[in-house]
Image (spheres, rainbow, N blue to C red):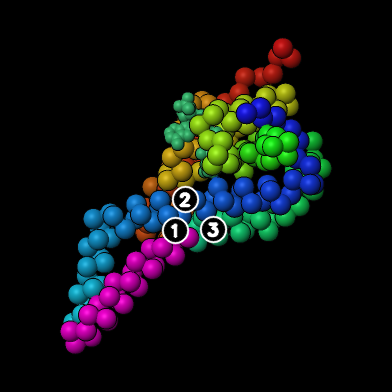
């Protein structure tokens, strides 16, 4: 399939938002599955069952309700992290993509488009925001919104989108590219490692108690760039 990477256009708006939202929400179930199969959470769930059973005077229904409460809390934490993140971004930079990413020279938003049955379809997205280090004034880029449609995965599209960001940042003389992901986004982490990103700080303790509860850590990575030589 021939896929072209081009600048975002306003007509892409809904497809781009849906791709971003789906790419985030697909991590909810794997994170939840991982969380409930951890020995600690199995033990806590059993404790809730037991306490519910005892306090309910031997009621199996109350035992199930108590256990379900804990499992529900774990699901809520996974859901709220990924769906909540998507929701908050859909209400900020992704609400007016052109306004946020295309009105400033150091920001950009790309889409990967394929023609399927002669109809254009968005298969991938990625964005960059140019920033400045407060102490040195050095410019760098932050990579955002990397997502590839599930039908186009493992074909090198994520790599191509990442390289597009790297080239953009090199052309602007940015000193580095940074990004943030989570330990549970294993495909993204593998892709970034392959592209030469290195972890700079792993919060053993995630910033939100809900993430700590389900054992997800935030991973910050960066890639140092050579100065652009015009070649
Ligand atoms: C992360 C993502 C963008 C990767 O896109 P992709 O087009 O499938 O990636 P590529 O085909 O370019 O893969 C490049 C390399 O990344 C690594 N990689 C990608 N997906 C992988 C997976 N599922 N498991 C292990 N390694 C993987 C491999 O090293 C791969 O090279 P290889 O195929 O030669 O082994 C895609 O999985 C996705 O959209 N995920 C959901 C959204 C998301 O989590 N985005 C990240 C936000 S921080």
Judge from the rendering whether residue 217 lies leftward or rightward of residue 224; answer left or right. Answer: left
Residue highlighted by disc 3:
83
> Quarter of the image containing the N terminus?
top right
Query: Is residue 119 placed above or below 173 in the rendered structure?
Result: below
**Disc 3, ligand 1: is the CB inside 8 Å?**
no
Q: Magenta segment, which residues?
A: 56-79
- Residue 70 magenta: yes
Secondary structure at numbered mark 2: loop
Where residue 228 appears, as percent x and y from the top left, is 69, 18
Q: Is the residue marked by circle 1 packed among few (<14), some (14-19), or many (20+) residues within 10 Å?
A: many
* Label number found at residue 27: 2
Q: Nearer the viewer, mark 1 or mark 2?
A: 2
Where residue 77 appears, as percent x and y from the top left, is 44, 62
Which residue is most to the front?
117
Judge from the rendering whether residue 213 lies leftward or rightward of residue 104; answer left or right. Answer: left
- In which quarter of the view is residue 179 placed? top right
Measure how far apart labels 3 and 2 are at the Cα level. Answer: 9 Å
Where residue 110 appears, as percent x and y from the top left, is 70, 36
């Amino acid at each position: 399939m021939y896929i072209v990477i081009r600048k975002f256009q306003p007509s892409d708006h809904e497809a781009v938002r849906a791709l971003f939202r789906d790419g985030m929400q697909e991590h909810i179930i794997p994170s939840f599955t991982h969380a409930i199969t951890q020995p600690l959470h199995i033990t806590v769930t059993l404790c809730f069952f037991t306490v519910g059973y005892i306090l309910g005077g031997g009621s199996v229904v109350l035992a199930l309700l108590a256990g379900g409460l804990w499992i529900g809390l774990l699901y809520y934490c996974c859901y709220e992290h990924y769906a909540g993140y998507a929701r908050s971004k859909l209400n900020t930079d992704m609400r007016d993509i052109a306004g946020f990413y295309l009105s400033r020279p150091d920001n950009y938003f790309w889409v990967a488009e394929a023609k399927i049955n002669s109809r254009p379809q968005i298969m991938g997205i990625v964005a960059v925001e140019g920033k400045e280090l407060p102490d040195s004034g050095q410019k760098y880029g932050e990579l955002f919104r990397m997502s590839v449609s599930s039908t186009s995965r493992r074909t090198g599209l994520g790599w191509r989108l990442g390289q597009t960001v790297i080239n953009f940042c090199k052309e602007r003389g940015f000193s580095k590219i940074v990004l943030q992901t989570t330990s549970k986004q294993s495909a993204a982490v593998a892709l970034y490692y392959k592209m030469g990103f290195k972890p700079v700080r792993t919060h053993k303790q995630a910033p939100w108690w809900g993430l700590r509860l389900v054992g997800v850590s935030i991973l910050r990575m960066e890639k140092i760039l050579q100065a652009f030589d015009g070649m």
